[in-house]
Image (spheres, rainbow, N blue to C red):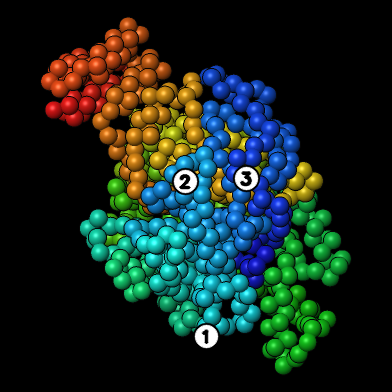
Amino acid sequence: MAFVHPSRRQATRSHFVPALRFSLAAGALAAAACIPSTTTAQTNNAGSASATAPSPDPRVGLRSGMMDAAEAYWNLKVLSKTPPSEKFVGITNSDLAFTGKYAIQGSYNGYQIWDISNPGNPRLETAYFCPASQSDVSVYKNLLFVSGEGLSGRIDCGGEGVKDTVSSERLRGLRIFDISDIKHPVNVGNVQTCRGSHTHTVLADPKDPDNVYVYISGSAGVRSPSELPGCSHETPDKDPNSALFRIEVIKVPVAHPEQAAIVSSPRIFNDLVAPPRHGEAPADIEAAARAAAAARARGGFTANVMGSEMVLPPAFTTPMLDSIVQARGGTGAPTAADSAALRAGLPGIIAKMMGGPAGSGNGPRPGPTQCHDITVYPAIGLAGGACEGYGLLLDISDPAHPVRIGAVADSNFSYWHSATFNNDGTKVLFTDEWGGGGQPKCRATDKPEWGADAIFTLENRKMVFQSYYKLPAAQTAEENCVAHNGSMIPIPGRDVMVQAWYQGGISVFDWTDVKNPHEIAYFDRGPVDSTHMVMGGSWSVYWYNGVLVSSEIARGLDIFQLTPSAFLSQNELDAARSVHLDYLNAQGQPHYVWPASFSLARAYVDQLERSNGLPSARIAAVRNSLDSAEEASGAQRRAALDAVATQIEGEASSSSDAAKVQKLAGAVRELASASR
């Protein structure tokens, strides 16, 4: 996520552009807390059994509303819609993590822990008030990790903020909680970092069970060394200890989390230059020009940011004016001379934030100074770093010292936000959060390559571009919509993903064929308000033990369940639901392993029927054989399954889908072994 909550008092390079245009309309959920979780709005489920999506798309033109917006869904059903608890109403909900039967939902006011054992009626277990932006969450065993980046977060979790420029009360980094007693979390440690923690990633190294590693992606400006010694905002050529152009790696002893500390600061951005980029859409250029002119007319501040004139919010300029007043030994409100001094200094300030000195035109501009998000996939020893203008491939075989082994850029991409690998580790998908999550980027006039996903194959540990995927339903100018967080769904033999698109809703799509990704299910609401932009929509949606759980920025927690369709059979869904996770951090991607089951074997049969990988007569015969074997038991079942597997293995070479036939044979063999 890249928009800045009103409580934050700084803007940074990666979040600067979107943050200046829209802000969260706090208090818009004033009445939400008294709405029961079973409240439903107008729905539309046309075409759920069809192999083609409903036309015209029912997502277009939905009625607006906060808790009563019209809804459209296809090939899934809504299990529950639960509004936030009292202290979290009107506050931005952020990311999700899962442990056992609980979903942990981050918020700019802390986090809420929901018991989702009954997904049709989630129950609030804990509402922990601890304001900070953006409170991204992860879990490992009894530990909960929470990110803090803004200037107002306090070590004591107080709600009064931090007013001093330098303060020992400020928390910018990682909070660590012991959640052994889920109803009474205990803050057992904090690790302060120079740029705070916008997001973080937990890496459990199977070779080191006593420790867990946390990668910190901090995107804020570098804090004063007077507040945290050792922090330097100089470039590495001027100060080798610069806090720029690096991430932080925190080592957390699981038995003693209070001893958590930074153990390395890998400079994974070395030698990268500024990537090619596309301009803004014409509608956005015109809107920005009008807003800038209006701001100047009323005495506001504007600045040229990446080629566009932007209005600077008071949260950005007020601290600077205060510093100018203090520097001259003054008191009281800033004078006209103070304002003039700030206007004169803004070009240099912005240039420094954007990675280069004012007026510098010699040589290429430097590339990103930080990552937005890193997804680790321990099963293959790799990580995908979504790092502003680049997608990075990292070797994480040494957890404390990740090494960049690949980098890709794309002029169609504006802000590389997050990464997801497919289950067998042969592909990686990056999202582009163009507009930072606070702008409408799914309008009919927006290019389909902008604010989309980019899909790459991994060939000899190199990323090779294949295609884009973008939400196919146009959204209005009053809906913040762009690619955001999602996860793989454990459909065996296929690459199926669910993804959040803010007020574009959620989209489930198949990218098994990397050249032709296509949507197979969705859910969407109308805009929060049809007259102006009000923040809302799905921040993140993840598959967890049979359900899709979505963190809705403004409306609370949504839970969905996929339904059988022409794209997903009941057997495929049953096989997916056979995969059980003890916990899930989407940025610490798990490797799915399917237990032996008849549903797994039948899922492969369904896929072979869909792809015409075996003749229809053979499909029917295999199904009959599996039915007969399931009715048998013991040695008789084992013998029947072995016979089926042998037959199938003999047909692989003549099939147009030989790999899938082999998967089917393997699944039947495993089922036979399980019958011993």
Residue 296 visible in the displayed image: yes
Q: Residue 52, relative to residue 327: is it above or below?
A: above
The residue type indicated by label 2 comes to: Ile
- Please tell me which residue lies in front, 216 or 146: 146
179 sits to left or right of 552: left
- Please tell me which residue lies in front, 217 or 124: 124
**Image quarter in which the C terminus is found:** top left
579 sits to left or right of 234: left
The residue type indicated by label 3 comes to: Pro
Q: Quadrant of residue 162?
A: bottom right
Q: Disc 3 marks which residue?
A: 36
Q: Residue 620, relative to residue 529: is it above or below?
A: above
Q: What SS does tag 1 mark? A: loop
Q: Which mark is residue 226?
A: 1
Pinpoint residue 575: horizontal percent, then vertical percent: 35, 30
Q: Residue at x 50, y 69 (%)?
A: 196
Mark 1, mark 3: which one is toward the viewer?
Answer: 3
Mark 2, mark 1: which one is toward the viewer?
Answer: 2
Pinpoint residue 189: horizontal percent, then vertical percent: 41, 73
Q: What SS does tag 2 mark? A: loop
Q: Residues within 10 Å of mark 1 (few under 14, many from 20)?
A: few
Q: Residue at x 75, y 63 (%)?
A: 311
Name the N-terminal-most of marks 1 and 3: 3
The residue type indicated by label 1 comes to: Ser
Q: Residues within 10 Å of mark 2 (few under 14, many from 20)?
A: many
CA separation in Å, label 1 and label 3:
49 Å
Q: Disc 2 marks which residue?
A: 116
